[in-house]
Image (cartoon, grey):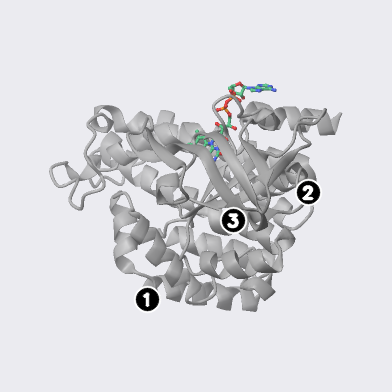
C-alpha cells in the first residue's frame, strides 16, 4: 500500500470530514468529548447517521450494502471517524456476525438479518465464552438438541458484551459429541426475548455495566436459524474471530488521545496554560510511546495491503494493538493521580461540573485504564495469540 494519498483519496477524506462536521449528530460528538457514557439510543442514532450515507457496514460486500471501498478508503474513514470523536460502531452485528451471514447465510437468513442489522433495527450479542470455556473455547458445553424443526438450547454464556442491549445473539453450541472437540459445534442465532433466555448483569472493574451472563433454559429455536452446516461451526467461529482481531488498532483515536495527553501533561506538570516543554522524564515516555504507535500504524498498513496476512499477522496485530492501547492508558494514569479516584456517574450530563478544568480527564482516564486491561483478554488473550504465532511460525 502506498502511503501517499491520491487526489481521489484527498477528496474522499474531505467528504467524510464534512459529514462528521455537519451531517452527523453533534450532540453525540459532544458527549464523547466530555467523557459522558453513551446510551443504546445514542449508538443507534450514530449508526443510522452512518448508514444514511451507506457508511455503516464498511466491510460487507456491496451487494449486501457495503460501500465497496478500497482498503485505503476504509482506513481514511476510520481515521476521520476517530478524529471527529465519533463512537466506534458496536462490532457484534456489523463487524462480527454480518460478514458471516453475507458469506455463509441462507437466502432467508440474509433477507431476515442483514437489512435489519444495517438499519440498526436489531442489535446483536456474541455468545461464545462460557464459565469453563474461554481460551479453550472448543470445550464449550451449551447444547442444542434437534427436535423436529427446532433446536432446544440449554446452557450458559458469560462475559457477553452488551447482551442487555441486544435483540439477537449468535451462539456457539454443541450439536453433537465427537472425538475431536472442535467437531460437533454449530453457530445458531436466537432472539433475546425467546422464552427461557435470561440475562444477568456483570458490573466491570471500571464500574460500568457492559458485561452479562446469559442463561438458556430449554430455549426453542427454529432450525433455519442455524448458520452453515450442523457440526461444522468451528471454522465459522474462527472466521468471526479473524475479523474481530483485525478491528482493534484505532490509530487515529490513539493519536487524538495523545494530543490530549500532551495538553493535560503541560497543564498538570507545568501549570495550567503553560507552553513550556514537558519535564524530560515524562516527555521521554511519551516519545517512546509515539514510536510504538508509528510502528503499529505500519503493521496495520501491512495487513490492509495484504503484505502481511494469515493467522500469524492477525494474531500479531491483535497483540501489538491491544498492548499499545494499554500503554497509552498507563500514561494517562500516571498524570491523573488522586484526581482519578472519585467515581462520578458519567451517564449524566454535567457529571464533571464540580471538578476543576484540568482534572476532568482523570475519571474517564481511570475508567479507560481499567477497561483497557480487558483488551488483551477478549477476542483471544495475548498468551493464546502468542501460542498461535509460535505454532504457525515453527
Ligand atoms: C470486557 C470483555 C468483553 C468480552 N466480551 C465477550 C463477548 O461479547 N462474547 C464472548 O463470548 N466472550 C466475551 N469475552 C470473553 C473473552 O473472550 C474471554 O474472557 C477470553 O477468551 C479468555 O477466556 P477466560 O476469561 O475464560 O480466561 P481463561 O481461558 O481461563 O484464561 C485465564 C488465563 O490463562 C491463560 N491461558 C489460558 N490458556 C492458555 C494457553 N493454552 N497457553 C497460555 N496461557 C493460557 C490466559 O491467557 C489467561 O491469562 C469478553 C471478555 C472481556 C474481559
Residue at point 49% right, 70% down?
119
Residue 45 seen in the figure = yes
Q: What residue is drawn where x is 55% and y is 51%?
A: 190
Spot the residue most to the right: 394
Choose top left, top right, bottom left or bottom right for residue 58.
bottom right
The answer to whether residue 224 is left or right of residue 367 is right
In the displayed structure, would residue 298 be above or below residue 215? below
Q: Nearer the viewer, residue 272 or 184?
A: 184
**Which part of the image, by quadrant, shows the C terminus?**
top right
Q: Give residue 351's position: percent from left, percent from top.
A: 19, 46
Q: Which residue is drawn at the image coordinates 49% and 72% (left, top)?
A: 51
Q: Position of residue 25 (x, y in %)?
A: 34, 69
Under 8 Å from ligand 1: the CB of mark 1?
no
Q: What is the C-alpha distance between the residues marked 2 and 1? A: 37 Å
Residue topped by disc 1: 22
Residue where numbered disc 2 is placed:
309
The extreme left residue here reads 354
**Callouts 2 and 1 close, C-beta under 8 Å:** no
Q: Earlier in the sequence, mark 3 or mark 1?
A: 1
> Where residue 83 sits: x, y (%)?
45, 60
- 121 left or right, relative to 367: right
Amino acid at each position: 500500500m502506498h502511503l501517499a494519498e491520491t487526489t481521489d483519496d484527498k477528496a474522499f477524506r474531505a467528504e467524510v470530514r464534512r459529514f462528521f462536521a455537519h451531517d452527523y449528530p453533534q450532540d453525540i460528538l459532544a458527549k464523547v468529548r466530555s467523557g459522558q457514557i453513551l446510551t443504546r439510543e445514542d449508538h443507534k442514532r450514530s449508526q443510522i447517521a452512518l448508514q444514511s450515507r451507506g457508511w455503516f457496514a464498511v466491510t460487507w460486500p456491496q451487494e449486501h450494502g457495503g460501500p465497496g471501498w478500497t482498503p485505503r478508503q476504509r482506513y481514511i474513514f476510520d481515521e476521520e471517524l476517530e478524529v471527529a470523536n465519533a463512537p466506534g460502531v458496536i462490532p457484534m452485528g456489523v463487524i462480527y456476525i454480518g460478514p458471516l451471514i453475507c458469506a455463509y447465510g441462507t437466502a432467508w437468513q440474509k433477507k431476515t438479518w442483514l437489512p435489519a442489522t444495517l438499519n440498526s433495527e436489531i442489535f446483536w450479542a456474541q455468545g461464545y465464552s462460557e464459565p469453563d470455556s474461554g481460551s479453550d473455547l472448543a470445550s464449550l458445553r451449551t447444547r442444542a438438541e434437534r427436535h423436529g424443526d427446532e433446536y432446544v438450547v440449554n446452557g450458559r454464556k458469560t462475559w457477553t458484551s452488551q447482551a442487555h442491549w441486544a435483540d439477537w445473539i449468535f451462539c456457539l453450541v454443541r450439536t453433537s459429541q465427537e472425538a475431536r472437540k472442535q467437531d460437533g459445534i454449530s453457530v445458531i442465532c436466537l432472539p433475546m426475548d425467546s422464552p427461557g433466555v435470561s440475562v444477568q448483569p456483570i458490573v466491570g472493574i471500571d464500574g460500568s455495566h457492559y458485561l452479562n451472563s446469559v442463561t438458556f433454559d430449554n430455549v426453542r429455536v427454529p432450525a433455519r436459524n442455524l448458520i452453515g452446516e450442523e457440526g461444522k461451526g468451528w471454522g465459522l467461529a474462527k472466521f468471526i474471530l479473524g475479523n474481530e482481531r483485525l478491528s482493534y488498532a484505532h490509530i487515529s483515536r490513539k493519536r487524538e488521545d495523545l494530543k490530549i495527553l500532551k495538553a493535560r501533561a503541560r497543564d498538570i506538570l507545568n501549570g495550567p496554560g503553560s507552553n513550556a516543554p514537558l519535564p524530560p522524564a515524562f516527555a521521554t515516555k511519551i516519545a517512546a510511546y509515539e514510536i510504538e504507535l508509528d510502528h503499529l500504524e505500519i503493521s496495520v498498513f501491512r495487513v490492509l495491503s495484504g503484505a502481511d496476512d494469515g493467522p500469524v499477522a492477525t494474531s500479531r496485530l491483535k497483540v501489538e494493538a491491544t498492548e499499545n492501547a494499554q500503554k497509552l492508558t498507563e500514561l494517562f494514569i500516571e498524570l491523573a493521580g488522586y484526581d482519578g479516584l472519585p467515581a462520578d456517574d458519567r451517564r449524566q450530563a454535567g457529571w464533571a461540573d464540580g471538578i476543576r478544568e484540568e482534572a476532568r480527564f482523570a475519571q474517564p482516564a481511570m475508567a479507560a485504564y481499567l477497561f483497557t486491561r480487558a483488551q488483551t483478554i477478549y477476542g483471544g488473550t495475548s498468551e493464546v495469540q502468542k501460542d498461535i504465532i509460535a505454532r504457525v511460525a515453527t
